Amino acid sequence: MFVDQVKIYVKGGDGGNGAVSYRREKYVPLGGPAGGDGGKGGSVVFVVDEGLRTLVDFRYQRHFKAPRGENGRNKSQHGAGAEDLVVRVPPGTTVMDTDTGEVIADLVEHGQRSVIAKGGRGGRGNIRFATASNPAPQIAENGEPGQERNVTLELKLMADVGLVGYPSVGKSTLLASVTAAQPKIASYHFTTLKPNLGAVDLGERSFVLADLPGLIEGAHEGVGLGHQFLRHVERTRLIIHVIDMAGSEGRDPYDDYLKINQELKLYNIRLEDRPQVIAANKMDLPEAAEHLARFKEQVPGVPIYPISAATKQGVKELMYAVADLLASMPEKVAVEEVAEVEERVVFRAEPEPEQFEIYRENEVFVVTGEKMEKLARMTNLNSYDSIQRFSRMMRNMGVDDALRKRGAKDGDTVRIGDFEFEFVE
């Protein structure tokens, strides 16, 4: 089964919780804090494996969750960090955030790695919170939640040459005549429902040829097989545009040529500049020679190779011409770069703007915001000192004042993430 698009869920492992502990040696009176930090959670990492060809494995497993870090222990022992969860994908896989449409990674080379969901850092143990005024703190953090996201995987075939053209112009017949591939061939539209690959062996030279499902008008908007087909054209170094020069279905070859190129351009503007040769197919049929003569006048300067895929007339010359063109071209198509996110600490002289929002849900005041929700989840609500620290941080961030402006009074319920508590003046 050829699968070229799937949606999956990935989650980085949570960090381990920090520990609250104290030294208990016999001859160390008033031993200080000795609670270790939690370990870092594992990340979900995608790695390219050239032995894979489809995304079919993701049809049966759609959830990938990395392990969490170990909790901190006493005697200042830090928890071990968890190992990353490695997920293998075929070359040519593009990873996109399903919710935002952002391209996270474009994976094309064997061994290439990309972190898709980062693991959370471990929570700090009470040894980290000791100060001169509080030498024996009862404070420890829970581990930071791991990043989670829904992602869409798209596989774009890593073929050297792609066959494009209207349905039933002879693409599958051409592939079968020059390779050992055995695509389904019939005289009705959309016989080819999935891409077929074949290797063309010319002795000292060879290349991979892809027969791609037929295009129709509106394909760039997903009409017909639309996007299922067009994504695979992006990776090809060269396009063979197969045209029914006999006009056997009543279509005009020149009109077909213009419409297919327009679909390619509308889908991805870079495809307009992709090198292209024309295979004028079905030259063994009546009227093909007359149509070819007129076609050459309409598209001067474009390389045209008269062929008959059924009788193999001119096919050998076309394949050698394609091999010559590939030899003069870069070995890889330029892939759109995905910007790496640079993590850095920025020191500001003035306070940051509010990083939260407040709204009412019936009688409950709901505080939302990534930073606030993460802070709540990392607070150990079983510890009085930890709760007091959480309250101080909320005040410093301006949450208390913002709640008062929204009308919160003593005893009202406030919700942050999964936690609810009373607002106290």
Image: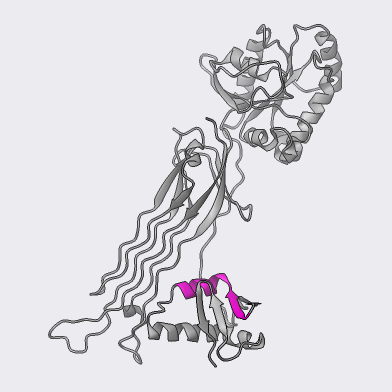
Coordinates of residue 335 in the picture (x, y in percent): 60, 42
Residue at screen point 30% across, 73% down: 36
425 or 274, which lies in front? 425
Q: Is residue 67 magenta?
A: no
Residue at screen point 48% across, 75% down: 376
Coordinates of residue 306 in the picture (x, y in percent): 74, 12
Residue at screen point 53% across, 18% down: 205
Q: Is residue 367 magenta?
A: yes
Coordinates of residue 360 in the picture (x, y in percent): 65, 78
Coordinates of residue 420 in the picture (x, y in percent): 51, 78
Task: From this view, report whether residue 133 is shown above or below residue 415.
Answer: below
Please indicate whether residue 139 sits to the left or right of residue 340 in the image: left
Write down the quadrant of residue 70 in the picture.
bottom left
Residue farthest left in this picture: 27
The answer to whether residue 308 is visible is yes
Task: From this view, report whether residue 8 is shown above or below residue 29.
Answer: above
Which colour scheme appears in the figure? one colour
376 or 284, which lies in front? 376
The answer to whether residue 299 is visible is no
Task: From this view, report whether residue 320 is shown above or below residue 31.
Answer: above
Q: Quadrant of the C terminus?
A: bottom right
Q: Which residues are magenta?
A: 363-377
Please indicate whether residue 252 sits to the left or right of residue 108 in the image: right
